[in-house]
Amino acid sequence: MSKAPKIRAAELRSLIEKYNYAYHVLDQPEITDFQFDQLFNELLDLESKYPELQSADSPTQRAGGPPLDKFEKVEHRQPMLSLQNAYSTDDILAFDERLKKALERDDDIAYACSPKLDGLALELIYEDGLLVGGLTRGDGRVGEDVLSNVKTISSIPLRLSSSKPPKLFEVRGEALMYKEDFRRLNETNDELGGQIFANPRNAAAGTLRQLDSKIAASRPLHFIAYGPGVLEGIAPKTQQQFESILAENSLPHLPMMGSIKDMKELTALAKKGKLPRFPALGFLAKNADEAKAYYEFINDIRGQLPFDIDGVVIKVNDWSLQDQLGFIARSPRWATAAKFQPEQAETEIEDIICQVGRTGALTPVAVMKPVKVGGVTITNATLHNQDEIDRKDVRIGDHVIVQRAGDVIPEVVEVVLDKRPNSAKPYLLPTHCPVCSEPVQKLDEEVKSRCVNPICPAILKNSLQHFVSRRAMNVDKVGDKLIDLLVDEGLVKTFSDLYRLNQETLLALPRMGEKSVTNILESLEASKHPSLARFIYALGIRFVGEQTAQTLADHFKSIDALKTADEDTLKDIEDIGPKVASSIVRAFKNQAFIKEISDLEAQGLQYQKGIVIPESEQKLKGLNIVVTGTLPKGREEVKQMITLAGGKSAGSVSKKTDYLLAGEAAGSKAEKAEKLGVKVINWDQFLELLN
Ligand code: IVH
């Protein structure tokens, strides 16, 4: 074999892992998804052409392999223990007192503090820098080897990045799913009739114990390291030093804050709802008082963290002191888990109201005396549906236990019957829609009642919000408030009405300036060339989420073909079940819906017909290209070429523009591009980008 492919493969691997780290660990992407995919595909090609180039640490391994029958059981070199629990700041001080006594010293002990992550414990084993094992905790002594799934976790390096990696490096941490990803996963699974998880922890556990690593690869798991297993060839002396070794090796962990002052700043930001997504969350406390302050700090901000936590872990920083302290039973004496109060609280129901969602579903909501649950004040909790209200026998005036689980909507767990006042009033869902007063219906087998009036303002507002959302038509300048206003003023009754808005009508709205009006109209204009999949998704057909929309677009290639498909044809498509099929057929039987689609087209909306480019082959994915001047093809056609290839085409040049495609007589846009340092390309260069 010539040397070049080997060198190129190594180069690609290191580049891919570098960008992967920037994206998944630092949360600071350095290249576009499109550029990333190109590198990745080049490596895949090389590895399939030269199988001898395949290796255990290649990023291509992250895609998952063939399903397993079962996981192998493997004994931990060193047992994975648990922690003693503390429940208050007093317990933290008592812990410190105990340690001082055991060590026979009065001077301060320094503690490495970190959030107690609520996922599941995972041990990674690196031998000579290569990831060779991934074990669950199991019973502490023997765990399961879930390496095939571990490799699919993008933030876990397949090879340590230090140039002289230790002979053996066992690192322990928590596998978890971010709250946002969890919500999205449940949403998608709900749509597709898949598994619904109770909380991010269960979702993470279910994913890590998947026998089919391709499924694991499709789910967004993360890993955050917090401690060592057996180490050979390195000997850190403190937890802080150990953490710098994690950092040197690109292992994701929660870095330490600079000083106690950072806590005050972060708390202030959190109060304003502006906590950065990944602030440094670890802390080296000089003494128990500082550890106590840390516990209170994390408790205050926990609701805003991207992942669930259930306390803080406080560890003696100095490993020689750890050795002196040793273990009691199955826990180290040198660490404690200071837990937060569970995310449940008692409060009183003042009223029960009924909300109407995008699909017309009626949801009863308890309005309660404000109560703090897990650091967040809540006033509303969902009661799901009438059956749930009846089952729990919830009445207005009742004292109830409410709970937040992960980031899901708070819910009423149970009624405190002892405290039920005589005046407590049972609740029945209305028989008429609380928004439009039309009678509601309960379709067979459904637990929810629905308003079925398609022009009900509640449904309309929600449908419009969905229509303009980022993953649908992506009209970023039309937000929820504007939609409320437009519907309330009677200016918008359908999707196509959005495109009928003009400067005059918008300017007449309260607090609306010329600049915002221009922005709104431009963003509507820029949204007129969606992919077919986005367009189908935007229409908001029940049970048709993003994935289903993509499947339908790939299969039918046009709305006209989809329109006439019958249930059997639809059911024959992989991933489309009877529920989804019948919902699609029902939607296209509705004349108003059909008319709306042609009205949208009449407003200049052109989804791509005929050709569909799968996302992985979209050459302009993520790129923002503004078009100006006279080109060999019409402006609209060029814009469509851009959107077809996954790009976006705004009306004006800004800092976000990647390229200005300039034809003859380009004018002011070209000047602006030059000023902003935006690259100007001509037609030939544009065609090159596309190929
Ligand atoms: S240190 C001897 N640090 O809590 C164990 N554990 O009850 C030392 N956990 O199984 C563990 N976040 O899965 C440590 N920042 C953190 C942690 C953490 C979560 C979990 C871990 C362990 C359990 C101990």
Image (cartoon, rainbow, N blue to C red):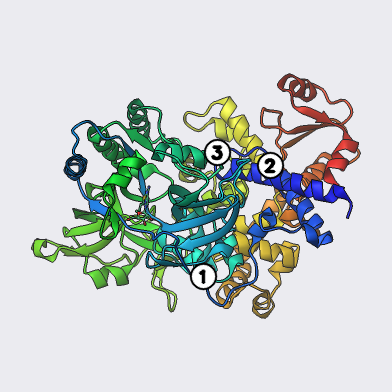
The structure residue drawn at horizontal position 63% and vertical position 36%, both measured from the top left corner, is: 521
- Ligand 1 under 8 Å from disc 3 Cβ: no
The one of 8 and 551 positioned closer to us in this rendering: 8
Q: Quadrant of residue 299?
A: top left
The label shown at residue 248 is 3
Give the answer, above or below, for where 485 lies relative to 204. above
Separation (CA) of disc 1 from disc 3: 40 Å
The label shown at residue 194 is 1
Disc 1 marks which amino acid? Gly
Q: Position of residue 507 (x, y in %)?
A: 55, 30
Pointer 2 residue:
32
Q: Quadrant of residue 541?
A: bottom right
Rate crowding at label 3 as few (under 14), some (14 to 19) or many (20 or more) other CA atoms within 10 Å: few
The one of 42 and 94 positioned closer to us in this rendering: 94
Of the numbered discs 3 and 2, the one sitting upstream in the chain is 2
Separation (CA) of disc 3 from disc 2: 25 Å
Q: Position of residue 552 (x, y in %)?
A: 68, 66
Give the answer, above or below, for where 173 lies relative to 480. below
Going by the image, does 319 lie left or right of 59? Answer: left
The one of 382 and 273 positioned closer to us in this rendering: 273
Q: Position of residue 263 (x, y in %)?
A: 34, 31
The structure residue drawn at horizontal position 30% and vertical position 69%, both measured from the top left corner, is: 388
